[in-house]
Each structure stands twice: as C-alpha cells, then as structure tokens.
Amino acid sequence: MLSIAHSATGAFIAAAIPNPLISTPLIFASHYVEDWVLHWDVGTGLSSGRKKPADAFKHELIDLALTGAFIFVFFQFSHQGINYQAWYGAFVALIPDFLEAPRNFFKWEPAWLKPINKFHGRFHHSTPDMVKGLLPQIALLIIIALLA
C-alpha cells in the first residue's frame, strides 16, 4: 500500500482510540491487513528489477508529501494545536515499511531485521497493474475522509 493509505488508517485509529496501549497494536495490525489486499505502491517492481531504487525513492518522497497533506487536512484542521494522536498513528502505521527501507534502497539488512521483514513480506500482495492496485486505496481514503 502507499504510505498515504497506511498513515491515514493509522491516524484514523489513533484519533478514534487515543489510548496508545489499545491503538498501537491495532495500527500495526492494520498495516499487515492492508498489505494483504492486492495493491500497487511505489516499491512495486523493486525486487524484480522492474523499478530502480532511485525512482522508487523519488516516488516515495511524493507519497510522503501527500501523506502529510492528507493527515493535516483531515485530522489537524478540527483541532486547536497539534493533533498528536493522529500524527502518532500516521507514523506508527509506517514502521513496517521503514524497517524494509535499508534492504530495499541500500541492499543492507541487519540480521535482527530479517525475521521482521520476512514476516512483513508474507502479507504483501502487490500488483504491477497500477489502476487495479490503486482502486482499493482510493476507496479507503474516501471512506476515511468521510468519517474523519
């Protein structure tokens, strides 16, 4: 999934359930459930060599900028001051992807990360078909925007 889909879900969960002892495991679980859904993301094609790491990195920066804008618009405007719960949820939702970044972009994976990344990989169902892979994410973002 794109970072925007994961982060929006994490922000939504954290804003709805401000107790991090409850929301944090739910946010982590949501990441893996979302990756299980057939999807396209900026890293699709990296492992097969169809996409260069430099291109994926540029696309990820765009994805992260859109993510920040989405979280700000849908979770920050309704608060006075910083909505820490939403930003916390958005960040936590991306941790499994952050842990894969050294392997995906630098071909470096410390031994302690291998089992974590292997577990994460079991949930990934990516498709090179961008339209087919973006539709569930667009639907998710619309639902979150309507409920936020």
Image (spheres, rainbow, N blue to C red):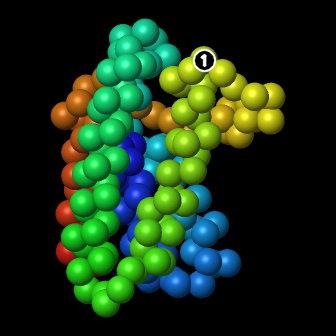
**136 displayed left or right of 89:** left
Q: Quadrant of the C terminus?
A: bottom left
Q: Give the residue pinned by disc 1.
A: 107
**112 displayed left or right of 33:** right
Pick the front one: 109 or 116: 109
Pointer 1: residues within 10 angstroms few (<14), some, or many (20+)? few
Residue 78: percent from the left, percent from the top?
26, 86
Pick the front one: 90 or 84: 84
Q: Amino acid at mark 1?
A: Lys
Residue 18: percent from the left, percent from the top?
52, 84
Residue at position x 24%, y 60% from top? 69
Residue 22: percent from the left, percent from the top?
63, 78
Pick the front one: 38 or 22: 22
**137 displayed left or right of 12:** left
Residue at position x 22%, y 70% from top? 73
73 in relation to 117, above or below? below
119 in relation to 18, above or below? above
